[in-house]
Image (cartoon, rainbow, N blue to C red):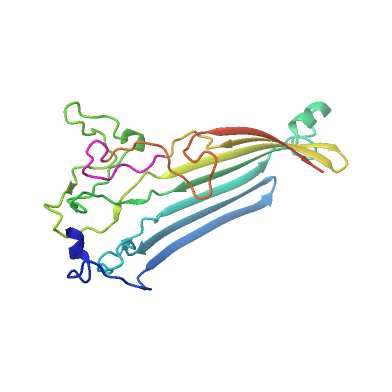
């Protein structure tokens, strides 16, 4: 079959390689950060990374490794992180505290708002077919909102999506499985949906007596309730799902709450002593 022609020693049906030093990866990145240290009740930080990660197809260790070196499937071109904290200017010792009555001053004072926003580019996609990777005819990336390119509108006769995430006609399958595809394993120009999340926490500090204090926290994860779409179907042989986004299951590293973009709100009471 086609795989046999990819091998360095195609005359053998099996080759055992021990300790092959074949893994290669290159990372280039521009990182920028801006920070406002705490003053006047406000602090925030912005981090941005523009990068590119390239590696070889590590699933084919005995292939022509120089040919299969391409953008990594883990590449994220743009990564943005913004975090900040704001102590609301009400209550004792705050800018607008002196004009409030004693009861209102205690109720309005001690509040702070913190938020975190993060956005990442989508990962590169790999198009598959039983005969091997299809030939790329043109750039398959499409413009427009992801919500308008879910592939949820189907042709009544063929069942082919009318609004696919990418141009599903931009690929031509190989004539047979005996042809070696000229395409790399991952396409840099075709990427999955980007991911974005906004979290916010509203906190009320409540002094009780002496060193005993309480903090009431209202936490909202994925505040905008915007879905994080999973990558579309990339198997060209599966015409019903090719270019179709079927779920919202994208995620950020380390996230547990609201990883699919669904809003999660919780209230917590913390006592400190």
- Assign the magenta stretch its main secondary structure: loop
In the rendered image, the residue lying farthest to the left is 175
Where is residue 16? Give x, y as percent: 30, 70
The answer to which of 222 and 129 lies nearer the viewer is: 129
Q: Is residue 135 visible?
A: yes
The answer to which of 115 and 190 lies nearer the viewer is: 190
Q: Which residues are magenta?
A: 229-242
Asked whether 142 falls inside the magenta stretch, the response is no
What residue is drawn where x is 29% and y is 34%? 151
Quadrant of the drawing holding the C terminus: top right
User: Which of the 4 quarters of the picture holds residue 216?
Assistant: top right
What residue is drawn where x is 25% and y is 45%? 235
Q: Is residue 182 visible?
A: no
What residue is drawn where x is 61% and y is 46%? 84
Where is residue 71? Give x, y as percent: 33, 60
Tell me if 53 is positioned left or right of 175 in this view: right
Where is residue 12? Give x, y as percent: 20, 70
In the rendered image, the residue lying farthest to the right is 210
Q: With respect to residue 186, does 112 lie above or below?
A: above
The answer to which of 40 and 103 lies nearer the viewer is: 103
């Amino acid at each position: 079959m086609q795989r046999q022609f990819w091998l360095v020693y195609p005359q053998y049906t099996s080759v055992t390689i021990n300790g092959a030093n074949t893994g290669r990866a290159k990372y280039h990145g521009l990182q920028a950060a801006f920070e406002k240290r705490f003053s006047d009740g406000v602090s925030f930080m912005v981090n941005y990374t523009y990068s590119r990660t390239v590696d070889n197809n590590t699933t084919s260790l005995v292939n022509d490794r120089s040919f299969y070196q391409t953008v990594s499937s883990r590449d994220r071109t743009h990564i943005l992180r913004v975090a900040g904290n704001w102590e609301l200017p009400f209550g004792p010792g705050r800018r607008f505290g002196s004009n409030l009555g004693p009861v209102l001053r205690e109720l309005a004072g001690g509040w702070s708002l913190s938020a975190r926003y993060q956005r990442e580019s989508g990962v590169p996609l790999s198009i598959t077919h039983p005969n091997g990777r299809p030939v790329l005819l043109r750039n398959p990336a499409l413009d427009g909102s992801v919500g308008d390119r879910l592939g949820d509108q189907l042709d009544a006769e063929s069942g082919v999506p009318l609004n696919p995430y990418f141009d599903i006609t931009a690929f031509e399958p190989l004539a047979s499985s005996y042809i070696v595809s000229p395409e790399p394993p991952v396409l840099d120009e075709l990427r999955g949906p980007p991911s974005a999340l906004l979290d916010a926490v509203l906190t009320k500090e409540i002094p009780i007596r002496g060193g005993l204090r309480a903090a009431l926290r209202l936490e909202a994860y994925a505040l905008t309730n915007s879905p994080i779409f999973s990558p579309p179907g990339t198997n060209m042989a599966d015409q019903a799902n090719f270019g179709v986004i079927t779920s919202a299951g994208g995620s950020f590293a380390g996230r547990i709450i609201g990883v699919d973009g669904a809003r999660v709100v919780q209230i917590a009471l913390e006592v400190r002593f």
